[in-house]
Image (cartoon, helix red, strand yellow):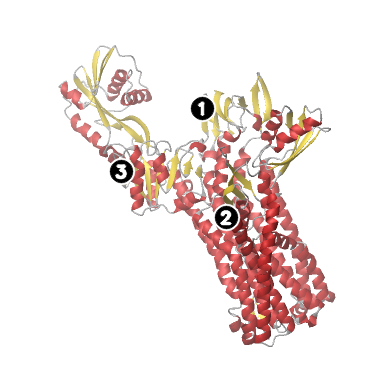
Amino acid sequence: MNSETHEQTIGRRSARIYVPLALGAALMFFLAASLTGDFPMVARFGGAGWVGLLSLIVAMPIVTARLKKSLRHPA
Amino acid sequence: MSTLIHTLNLPVQGMTCASCVAHVEDALKAVPGVTGVVVNLGAQRATLNYDPGRVTVADLTRAVDAVGYRVPTLETVLDVQGMTCASCVGHVERALTDLDGVTAAVVNLGSGTARVTHILDIVAVPALKQAVQASGYTALERSAQVDSLDRERQAREDEIQRQGRNLALAGIIGLVVMLGTFYDMLGPLRAVVPVWLSYKWVIGLLTTPIVLGPGRQFFVNSWKGLKHGVTDMNLLYATGIGAAYGIAVINTLFPQAGFGGEGATFFESAALLTAFILLGRWLEALTRGRTSEAIRKLMKLQPKRARVVRDGQELDIAAEEVQIGDVIQVRPGEGIPVDGQVQDGYSAVDESMLTGESLPVEKKSGDAVIGGTLNKTGAFRFTATRVGKDTALAQIITLVETAQASKAPIQKLADWVAGHFILGVHILSVAVFVFWFFFGYQRFFDPASAFIMSPYSLGEIGVFGFSLLLSVTVLVVSCPCAVGLATPSAMMAGTGKAAEYGVLFKGAEAIENASKLQTIVFDKTGTLTRGEPSVTDLVAMTLPGSLEASEVLRLAAITEKNSEHPLGEAIVQGARGRGLALGDADQFNAIPGHGVEARVNGQAILLGNRKLMRDRQIEFHDLWREAERLEVEGKTVMFVAVDEAAAGLIAVADTLKEHAADAVRRLHALGIETVMITGDNRRTADAIARQVGIDRVLAEVLPQDKAEEIKKLQAQGRQVAMVGDGVNDAPALAQANVGLAIGSGTDVAKETGDVILIKDDIRDVIVALEVARATMRKVKQNLFWAFVYNTLGIPLAAGLFYPFVSLIISPELAGLMMAVSSVSVTLNTLLLKRFTPSIRREPLGSFNPTPLPAPQVVAGVSAK
């Protein structure tokens, strides 16, 4: 029971980090596409979505694993 | 309060790649109270230490389940007798659930049954029964019980069936999708393919059940992993399939949305990619089981029934019910159920399945028999001495399982690479997308672009569709599943193959180290030699009236009959071995440090060393020189005088084991330097070394200094193995890079050393080396094949050559390449099953072994 609560805490706290990271990456892509070229709106949104998704996939395990480790071995 | 740490070998199903290994390891390490987690992909097992006071096995299975894998459990139904009320139900349930490895127990008073869900590898049915019996009830197993072997086979067959069903569905529908997609290019085939099959929405409808049916497992498993902060190759598939399918749906429903329109509906990519990944999974499931065939073969050896004689009656009972001390009757052709000692009867037993010994072994009263071996000709009774987990067969199975579950250093590196690979691939995928989106498309896109090996045109595709396609293909082509399989599959096949020949590797590291050996150090006594002195030479005086050699031996043996000296025993054995009748001496007198004297039928016999003869002024003429020659050969010479006249010489020495010289010669052929280590004096050691063909001799080394000598060899930069009997050589065996304990028989659990040679045949050192080298060759080949696909596939998929050829890889072709890489690795491993050690390929004697030193005939006198 306790370990499930612990897992949920880690999940919630890590989501607060990786979701903004992924959204930030998507936003950066969108801004770059809007500022640097004449890309159609769909390509800008689609590209931002894809970059955001891949960034989420990259950030999720890294952030969750780090948080788990830091909670297990508090400095 | 002291804490008792338990070690657990937990079966884990569903792992398909090295990153799965990392996930399961991380999940288990995260459980408080768990340490030393090692997960093996090939063996599908996790080995760990846990504190039962802080964590239960159920917690561990939950941790594994939480990251998307499964600990297989078995449901066993027990008939429980003696329950009378509801509290009995509570007692029995508690007795069962208190056992480690029991995840649930439901007792039904009305039907008198207990339905127990348990992990068979941790708690077997007899333990369940014992727990119930200990709480005051009687438990009997329902007869339809599935045993361990059947369960393992069942699990494998279920997985093959599941992936086979998925593949059939995805393959058949995928083929129809292909026909529809390439309708315009079908030529005369169009007459039989309806045109509506080429409509995008029909193709979309056909693809949907593939993605949401057989392809669902990738999405579910990757989501489970992501939630716990882990990524595996399911994620590569899920993003690949999901992206191809999602874009195709958008382009079909909203062709004007700007994602490439109808010209970029990659439904066939999603369908065929799923089908090819499933093809890889199915073939993997099909072949993976075969690499662990050795364990199944060993498990199969265990006879299920035993004919036990109790109170004068023969009872046919389950083999696991046999207890120590039971007398068991074995008839011709029957398997021997447990280990024991023959009480009466005579037979020949085929032990090849456990020891690799090809000839049946004779068994008579007092001889040991091994459970799992096969009685050939006669009938006999034996007393059970080891049962259950203590039998040789059970110990061998445990040892092979443990070895297969361990990791070689090379595998740890491959796992680390594969584990970090997936995140790297996703980062690369972003980079590829960004490059082609912002730079590549504008600069290099050619409207005449096409997929490799496909007539499909990419002319209408936009910047987003094109960049996405390359990004997805990178994800799909990069799957490191072949990297994860390369080492464990070969290690499993190698350890299994070695076990077939009676060579047990205790771990994958031992195989890797054995493959690199440069020097092998043999202990002399008991390893190269028999360790028992015997008569090697008889030399009689050739003067007129002298005694014959056999008479000299007979008189010496009678004189030594009452002696307890090892040399005396050798002479007595030598005489008996030659069929000489030995009477008794009338008088016997030991001369300490020199010899013995006795009167035999009125003759005065003097037997002893040179000094004794000189003291008594007995002249041996030419035999003095003969004695010196024998002593140079490392033999101990005893002089025999009868009635104060020289009669002859008897030479005694430790003799070589049957195949010692052959083994050393074969090792030289393999490029191995051979060293002999012994406490004997230099002259004796050199003599033995000359007979065997040993390169270097380390003589006069005290037992406690042997490890130091090994260290010195290692300091010269050599990879050293020590071959010894595993008892007094333990420190040297431990110091060596590989310790080989020879002739341990079947009590393998007690042995020191990294490799255990069950038979007392020194040539098994060559078997160990050859199997290790063949296994590591396979590992290297597998890693080459695994990496070559990724090394070639990733630049192709990322569009590195696109500016020059205007061709890119389709996601489905990337999926096929990935599947082929896994299958080629597994098939390559299966080739190891054909491996035969050189000593089995060549008929006995074809290697021209050095003849054994036999009793010599000198001066024309027969030794008989």
The answer to the question of whether label 3 and label 2 lie on touching residues, with beta carbons closer than 8 A, is no
Which kind of residue does numbered mark 1 sit on? Asp
Q: Are marks 3 and 1 on the same chain?
A: yes
User: Front-most of B377 and B158?
Assistant: B158
Which kind of residue does numbered mark 3 sit on? Leu
The answer to whether any part of residue B427 appears in the image is: yes
Subunit of label 1: B
x, y percent for residue B674:
35, 47
Q: Looking at the rendered structure, which numbered label has been put on residue B698?
A: 3
Which quadrant is the N terminus of chain B positioned in? top right
The answer to whether any part of residue B675 appears in the image is: no
Secondary element under disc 1, as helix, strand or loop, is: loop
Q: Nearer the viewer, mark 3 or mark 1?
A: 3
Q: CA distance from mark 1 to mark 2?
A: 58 Å
Q: Residues within 10 Å of mark 2 (few under 14, many from 20)?
A: few
User: Which residue is farthest bottom?
Assistant: A38
Q: Please name the residue that numbered disc 2 is placed on.
A: A73
Instruction: Give the residue displayed 53% in from the left and 56% down from the top.
Output: B412
